[in-house]
Amino acid sequence: MSNIKKKIKIRQGYRAYLTKILSNADDIVQNYDGNQEKKLKQIRITLKERLDTLNTLDEEILELIEADEEISTEIEEAGKYRESAHEMIVNIDSVLEAKPINETMSRSMSESQQLSTPGHYQPTIKHGKLP
């Protein structure tokens, strides 16, 4: 098997794995309930690692390709995988960043509900006139 064919086979394996990770990540992002934070962070790291590996393989394969048409096809195909992975990384970041905001809001709401509960001490603020 020639060097280019071997690299293409290796890249196919990495692309298949990337597709599987993207599908798994999409399921978690769509049904995120706050308990999968660690899993999403792990998937994000894995996506970045796979992207780096695929970028290296894509560059090596492009160096070995001689036909102009194949080069543009390879670049376009590689771009689609990169776009999908980047989109998922952005989605993961959005979900993870939204989590602390939701937690902060729910905490402050529960604290304000506790303060307004009858029998709870509520300090009163008095305003006096200063000369």
Image (cartoon, helix red, strand yellow):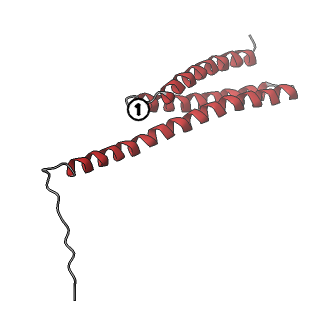
Which residue is farthest front? 118
Q: Residue at x 56, y 22 (%)?
A: 23
Residue 93 location in percent, x, y?
Answer: 50, 39
Vertical comparison of 46 with 105: above or below? above
Q: Looking at this view, is 104 or 76 the one in front?
A: 104
Q: Residue at x 12, y 50 (%)?
A: 119
Residue 86 location in percent, x, y?
Answer: 60, 35
Q: Looking at this view, is 91 or 104 the one in front?
A: 104
In the figure, residue 65 lies in which quadrant? top right
User: Where does label 1 land, which residue?
Assistant: 37
Side of 99 relative to 51 (left or right): left
In the figure, residue 69 lies in which quadrant? top right
Side of 75 relative to 48 (left or right): right
Label 1 Cα neighbours within 10 Å, binned few <14 / some 14-19 / many ≥20: some
Quadrant of the frame with the C terminus:
bottom left
Q: Residue at x 63, y 31 (%)?
A: 84
Quadrant of the frame with the N terminus:
top right
| Amino acid type of the residue tagged 1 in the rendering | Glu
Which residue is farthest right? 68
Q: Residue at x 82, y 30 (%)?
A: 72
Vertical comparison of 128 with 22: above or below? below
Residue 19 location in percent, x, y?
Answer: 60, 21
Side of 123 relative to 30 (left or right): left
Q: Looking at this view, is 54 or 114 the one in front?
A: 114
